[in-house]
Amino acid sequence: MSLIPATILTGFLGAGKTTLLKRILSEAHGQKIAVIENEFGEENIDSDILVSDTQEHIVQMSNGCVCCTIREDLRSTLQELAEKRRKGELQFDRVVIETTGLADPGPVAQTFFMDDEVAESYLLDAILTLVDAKHAPEQLNERQEARRQVGFADQIFISKSDLVSADALDALTHRIKHMNPRAPHHVVHFGAMDLKDVLDLRGFNLNATLDIDPDFLSEAGHHHGHDHAHDHGHDHHDHAHGDQCDHPSHAHEGPGGHHHHVDDDVKSFVFKSERPFDPGKLEDFLGAIVNIYGPRMLRYKGVLYMQGSARKVIFQGVHQLMGSDLGPAWAQGEAKLSKMVFIGIDLPKDILLQGLEQSLV
């Protein structure tokens, strides 16, 4: 049986996770979705959609979706769902896991890598982070959990943008882009959002990375050394609505322009090289780094040019867990190049860049 795609939905309190979940659960989208709700959440899905039956924590919805709240741990819930699906007791095509407002999505994501039984049944598709435009600046300033959620995301949805000015929204999107240049972000209204933008994003699937993530490579490359260059030219996918795209150029900012007065502890940086990596040296260096800084490394990802391999090597990780995969072959005449992006909390950029440089052939 093919793997069940799983999506982790995280985000700030009040950003609309419940609204989005209700939509996923009640809409006739023809997909059967199992939603796992972390019931320590401050905002549970209203009992009016859920049939409450105290004995059974898995509820079948009228449109064929399944919903359950976690009382024990995520692992056992995922295993139980997969087993019921194998036996034909439950039918569902995918899983959406909602984490509580202040949760760190890291351990939830790690469950899919670390636990063999879970890994045999599920494919972690993507981590989605919902950001409430109105309260984001304050939440990002005050709460590291909020900054971590932005750093972890494969896709960021900014809600409630109608409650803030165009300038404020612009400043917020720039701030988010600095923290996580890898995740496309969309300004959304959950009432009018296409579910295909939420599901099957393949943010975690190593082999497909290149197909879905061309922006990761082109955009991230711009801010090696100079931080402001990538402020231009990313509007093509940032705004869901054309009317927000006409803001004037940011050229007037100059160095340290007004968007960058906040220096968040969650930051990203990029490493690029046209020289190939020595596989042994790189493995030793990354192993050492992950050992020391793993808890502060939120997401890291790259396409590597390795000595002795005719194929691209695609690698990525969450905290201490790292995985790599052979990607497609380097095309005839294609410039061979390694590009890596690291997103983390106060990572020692110089040490990492120097160590990577020393791992080259």
Image (cartoon, grey):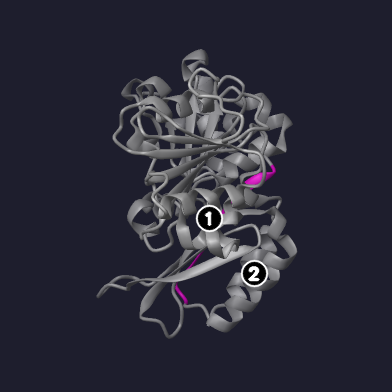
Q: Main secondary structure of the magenta part?
A: strand
Quadrant of res 329: bottom left
Q: Dot 2 lies on which element?
A: helix
Residue 178 at what x, y percent from top left?
56, 42
Q: Report the residue marked by disc 2.
A: 354
In front of the other: 282 or 335: 282
Work out whether 49 lies above or below 156. above
Q: At label 1, which amino acid type do we have?
A: His
In front of the other: 24 or 11: 24
Query: Does 305 appear in magenta?
Result: no
Residue 278 at what x, y percent from top left?
53, 82
Q: Within 10 Å of the Cα at label 1, are there few (<14), some (14-19), or many (20+) other Cα atoms? A: few
Q: Residue at x 66, y 39 (%)?
A: 71
Residue 117 at what x, y percent from top left?
54, 62
Q: CA distance from mark 1 to mark 2?
A: 14 Å
Compared across the picture, whether 271 is left or right of 232 comes to: right
Instruction: Please report contact status of discs 1 and 2: CB closer than 8 Å, yes or no.
Output: no
Query: Does 273 appear in magenta?
Result: yes
In front of the other: 70 or 291: 70
- What range of the chain is rendered magenta? 265-275
Q: Dot 1 lies on which element?
A: loop
- Inspect this view and state whether residue 190 appears: yes
Q: Report the residue marked by disc 1.
A: 224
Residue 211 at what x, y percent from top left?
33, 56
- Which disc, if any, is residue 300? none
Q: Residue at x 65, y 51 (%)?
A: 107
Of callouts 1 and 2, which one flags the residue occurring earlier in the amino acid sequence?
Answer: 1
Q: At label 2, which amino acid type do we have?
A: Gln
Q: Residue at x 47, y 52 (%)?
A: 82
